[in-house]
Amino acid sequence: MPRPGQVKSSGERLSDRIALGVLTRVFPPRLVDEVIAECGRLEQRSRLLPARVVVYFVLAMCLFSGQGYEEVARLLTQGLEHARRWEKPWRVPTTGAIGRARRRLGLEPFKALFAQVCRPVADEDTAGAWYRQWRLVAVDGTVFDIPDTDANAGFFSRPGSGRGQQRSAYPQIRVATLVECGTHAVFAAATGPLKVHEQHLVTGLLDRLEPGMLVLADRGITGFELWRAATDTGADLLWRVRKNIVLPVLEHCGDGSYLSEIVATDDRFRRSNPAPVRVIEYTLAGSDDTVYRLITSLRDPQQAPAAELAALYHQRWEIENTLDEIKTHQGGPQLVLRSRHPDGVEQEVYGFLLVHHALRDVMHHTAHQAGLDPDRISFTRTLNAARRHVTGQAALSPLTTPPRSHPHLP
């Protein structure tokens, strides 16, 4: 029986209460536990760092980028230690213990959690998310600098390591993503070594495309085989192509565009297996007379006029803004990931993507309730609010689903 002023132990461990504040709505413990079980990562014995806590820790270190391992662990438990008496005390793990726990957990639970959680989030009323009946999405790639260890350099390699090129200070991991333009929600991702071309990684994203999507892409992504594979999903495409692509004029359209076809590189003379496209060419007012060449699977000008598609193409920059949010705002200027082993690097990339998706999901719900365009909600303010909620989570039980919005979010 406790003495006066003491609180009786609830029989609950402090680690059972570790959560991600308002982001726990997107990553509830029940879902995290299901993913861990499906991936065969359940603990065989009680540990200081149970698998669920390690998942939340990795997400927290991608939310509090720049903080050391032990400081992230303190931030996760701040406000919990004195909230009640626990059956078992919990001490902040050492950096080495956290690193070992991350390696035990591995990459697969994070990829599985991404597959379950990360979806397009716009509804039919979301401003900027649609062109007529099509959901606007964009595809692009980026790279992340990673620690200069032998393991990372050997697996991922570094730029500028060829003959006559200056050696880069950091190895890099290549990442390809699909992003919903109106909400900046990343809903598909693939990672690989630097030597793997973006086109190859993008192939691994195509199963997340579906009819009713209009996919925007820049010149570095386009290719005949990729075009064929992407259109086979039922999605429509609007891609910029290089000026040296041969696009014969088969039929002029009344809106200034024309019907044409593209072929594989080894079929450019016989043209025996062409893919039909519509071509839109234009220059921007006040520019240096650069000619933009777009090809689209939308071949009916009445369905999608050329002037509208030309204006629409520049929505592709939404994916550039999304990657900037992740790398510059969430990760911090001159971001270098912290993981010293290849599995940890990929795990950390998925951690960044998961946290960003959760933030963007919260922003979409907040905007929807306020009747605003999601672009009117500040990503930085939302990020800072989410960080505050993690450190003030003593009143939040991770065993229940938090509300879908919070009065203190922007």
Image (cartoon, helix red, strand yellow):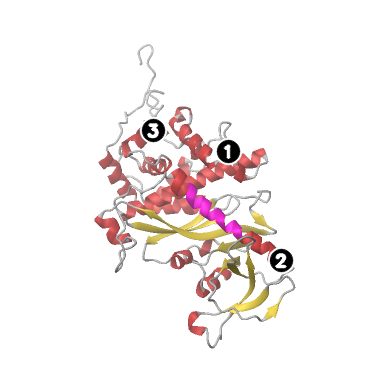
Query: Could you tell me which residue is drawn at 35 percent across and 32 percent down?
Result: 74
Residue 320 within the segment the image draws in magenta: yes
Residue 364 position within the rendered picture, expressed as x and y whole percent measured from the top left? 59, 44
Q: Which one is earlier in the sequence, the residue at label 3 or at label 2?
A: 3
What is the distance, in whole Å, between disc 1 and disc 3 at their CAs?
23 Å
Residue 52 within the segment the image draws in magenta: no
The magenta-colored residue range is 314-325
Secondary structure at numbered mark 2: loop
Query: Could you tell me which residue is drawn at 56 percent across and 56 percent down?
Result: 317
Residue 218 position within the rendered picture, expressed as x and y whole percent measured from the top left? 53, 64
Q: Which residue is mark 1?
A: 404
Tell me the number on the disc at residue 186: none
Query: Could you tell me which residue is drawn at 66 percent across and 63 percent down?
Result: 309
Which of 3 and 362 lies nearest the eye of the viewer? 362
What is the distance, in whole Å, between disc 3 and disc 2 at their CAs?
53 Å
Disc 1 marks which amino acid?
Answer: Arg
Mark 2 burial class by Cα count in 10 Å: few <14, some 14-19, many 20+: some
Q: Is residue 306 left or right of residue 17?
A: right
